[in-house]
Image (cartoon, grey):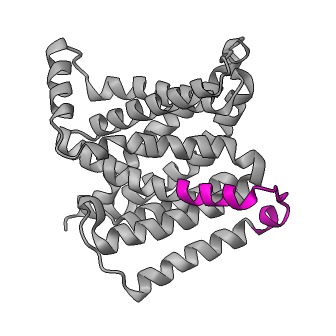
Amino acid sequence: MDTKNVLLVLVCVPLACFIAGAGLPLQAAININLGRDVGHGLWSAFFSFATGAVLLAFFAFPRLRLSNLRTFCKEVRAFPRMVVLFGGTLGSFYVACSVLLTPLIGFGVFYVCVVCGQVATSLLVDSLGWFWSPVRPLTAMRALGGFVVVVGTVVFQLDRILGASFEPLYALYVVLALMAGCFLVLQSTWNRKVGHSLGSPWRGGFVSFVMGTLSLAIASLCTGVVPDVSQSTQSVGDTWKWLGGAIGVCVVTVWIVCPTYISFAATFSLTILGQLVGRH
């Protein structure tokens, strides 16, 4: 392995995963604030995904031509495993949970549950080769590493966990948070497959955000709440409330690209470290 590849694998890829993880708590905080302004958390998640889809469109289609779009649509319709096109739906579930559950169970409990889901699923994906991923056998050291990550996360968030208020539906909220963590890893594997088939990680991310946007649009309409964006567009200082989608684009892109160079377990372990630092 030459010096360039060593620098990429040992420095650039881990740093990208760490920064992506640090962005997740920031994205959740931004979307929560936007949700307060527009009237419901699901609408803020919808706007986050919609802005992300628009941003990714510029990268996925640098030369916007009707013929290119037609070819892209044909490639999507001809995709042999249509289920993986719904990676964005899994991602939208996480974003919705981060907005709706954190006020109920607290950031500490939510992220511990997400971390547990991420670690367990990433180890399974690697060891069993799920969803077209290369098989990386589960060794004692890797299992120990996952255990240390979970325990470290619990210790790091212990004060918040102990200070959390327990709601009557607390167990359900915890299960949903665990599912959100699992879905993040599955979303990454599905988006990676789509990006590879379409010839570009940007296009894989674009499909993901479009599907997430559609899923959240349906969920948001079911709430019966009419979004009011006037509160979040009153001044230039409110622009930050619309940056959740941009952060999501960075995170999803990292999750599509980085597992090619390191394992899913390593990718999400570094992401978790970034989450912990981002929370503080």
Residue 238 vertical position relative to residue 185 in the rendered view, above or below: above
Q: Main secondary structure of the magenta part?
A: helix
Give whichever of 236, 65 is nearer the camera: 65
Q: Residue at x 59, y 27 (%)?
A: 222
Q: Would you say residue 168 sits in the magenta stretch?
A: yes
Range drawn in magenta: 158-180
Q: Is residue 174 magenta?
A: yes
Residue shown at 85%/61% (left/top)? 163
Figure quadrant of the N terminus: bottom left
| Quarter assignment of residue 57 | top left
Percent position (x, y) of residue 81? Answer: 22, 46
On-image quarter of the C terminus: bottom right
The residue at the point 24 percent across, 63 percent down is 3
Toward the bottom, the furthest residue is 140
Question: Can residue 79 be seen?
Answer: yes
> Which image quarter: residue 52?
top left
Q: Residue at x 61, y 56 (%)?
A: 177
The answer to whether residue 116 is above or below residue 274 is below
